[in-house]
Image: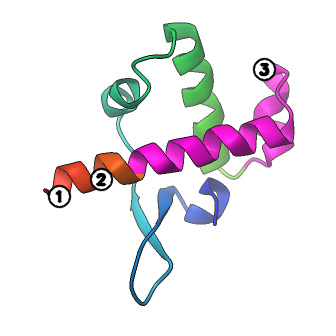
Amino acid sequence: MNLREGCGRVPIKSEGETPWTLVEFPTREDFDAMFCRQSPELRDKYWTMLNARKGGQLLREAGAPFGLTRERVRQIEAKFQSRVKIWHESKRA
């Protein structure tokens, strides 16, 4: 499952009966904290691209303004989902 299929939420892999859990999309502040090691320009690019995916754009459409391939957008989205899972679990603890 990807951001486009998440209907405005972030699908994260879960254990148990359902293989995916939908969690709220993080705020910009939380997103910046998740990607704090990236430059501000790169964080802006990722934020814009991931919001485009959340809004229903295809991988190619979301990456085109930044010259990114579909595969690179998919990789960034996978990293984002992984970090959201860690962020979500830390908020629950």
Q: Residue at x 80, y 22 (%)?
A: 65
**Whether residue 25 can be seen here:** no
- Circles 1 and 3: CB atoms closer than 8 Å: no
Q: Secondary structure at mark 3?
A: helix
Is disc 1 surrounded by few (<14), some (14 to 19) or many (20+) residues within 10 Å?
few
Label 1 vs label 3: CA separation?
35 Å
**Whether residue 57 can be seen here:** yes
Q: Residue at x 50, y 16 (%)?
A: 38
Of labels 1 and 3, earlier in sequence is 3
Please identify, in this view, whether the residue under mark 2 or under mark 3 is nearer the observer: 2
Res. 1 image quadrant: bottom right
Q: Position of residue 59 (x, y in %)?
A: 79, 45
- Circles 1 and 2: CB atoms closer than 8 Å: yes
Q: Mark number for residue 92?
A: 1
Q: Which residue is mark 2?
A: 88
Where's the C terminus, which quadrant? bottom left
Amino acid at dot 3: Phe
Is disc 3 surrounded by few (<14), some (14 to 19) or many (20+) residues within 10 Å?
few
Compared across the picture, whether 51 is left or right of 31 comes to: right
Label 2 vs label 3: CA separation?
28 Å
Tell me where the magenta segment starts and ends, as one range.
57-84
Q: Position of residue 78 (x, y in %)?
A: 61, 48
Q: Which residue is mark 3?
A: 66
Q: Residue at x 43, y 66 (%)?
A: 22
Please identify, in this view, whether the residue under mark 1 or under mark 3 is nearer the observer: 1
Q: Residue at x 86, y 33 (%)?
A: 69
Q: Secondary structure at mark 1?
A: helix
